[in-house]
Amino acid sequence: MPRPAPSPTPEPPAPPRAETPAPQPIGVVSTSLRPWVEISMQPLRCTVTDANVTFEFELELFNSGSAPARDILVEAVVVNAGENQDQDLASFFARPPGPGQRIEIIPPLNRTAFVTQVVIAREHVQSFDMGGREVFVPLLAFNAFYRRGSGEAQSSVAYLVGPATKGDKLAPFRLDLGARLFEGLAARLLPLGVRK
């Protein structure tokens, strides 16, 4: 009697195929190219006279975006620190650009810096008494208007400015010392601003 053929041995299942993961993007992926102008400021000196208070500072504009920023106009103003400072800053940030000399272009990831000044008349300085001393606390605010492609853009920041101290705080400026030059200044960036 013939012997039955042996049953075929089942083949072991194939090991699962390893899926090759899709490459992940590195860094920030942008669907549109546009410039972003960042503003930084370093105060250099403040001159107080009977007529004016003048702030001299170095202003740096950095294009952190991926396209050129064109026709850049920068405006500056001195605002008195106090109860109305947020409202005063908001009004300045909302102002349309005025006339002025423009920077032609800042390419992507490039910066430009220059020294300039802003002047406020003494009659517009809001002073207050601090232990028998007449002092004031200024804010320097900046609007940068620029063109991005066919549209308009704006960056705005504000800084508290004062003589540097050994701590984190800034000293106020004294107005009761007559005409005076203040050096050794520092600035603190405020949380208010515009980036659009």
Image (cartoon, helix red, strand yellow):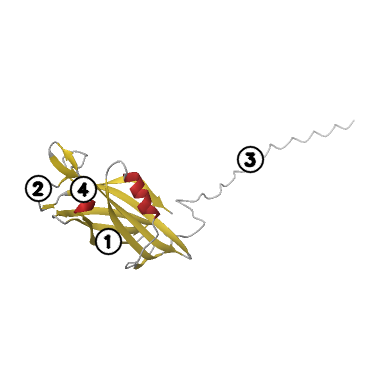
Q: Secondary structure at mark 4?
A: strand
Q: Name the mark nearer the viewer: 2 or 3.
A: 2
Circles 2 and 1, Cβ within 8 Å, touching? The answer is no
Name the N-terminal-most of marks 2 and 4: 2
Separation of residues labelled 4 and 3 (CA atoms): 64 Å
Q: Amino acid at mark 2?
A: Leu
- Residue 127: percent from left, percent from top: 20, 45
Q: Which residue is mark 4?
A: 186
Separation of residues labelled 2 and 3 (CA atoms): 84 Å
Q: Name the mark nearer the viewer: 2 or 1.
A: 2
Name the N-terminal-most of marks 2 and 1: 1
Q: Secondary structure at mark 1?
A: strand
- Image mark for residue 113: 1
Is residue 98 shown to the viewer in this render? yes
Q: Residues within 10 Å of mark 1 (few under 14, many from 20)?
A: few
Q: Quadrant of the N terminus?
A: top right
Separation of residues labelled 4 and 1 (CA atoms): 18 Å
Q: Name the mark nearer the viewer: 4 or 1.
A: 4
| Direction from residue 166 to residue 153 in the image, left or right | right
Image quadrant where residue 13 sits: top right
Q: Quadrant of the C terminus?
A: bottom left
Q: Secondary structure at mark 2?
A: loop
- Image mark for residue 189: none
Q: Amino acid at mark 3?
A: Pro
Question: Observer-nearest residue: 139 or 132?
Answer: 132
Name the N-terminal-most of marks 4 and 1: 1
Q: Which residue is mark 3?
A: 16
Q: Name the mark nearer the viewer: 1 or 3.
A: 1
Q: Which residue is mark 2?
A: 177
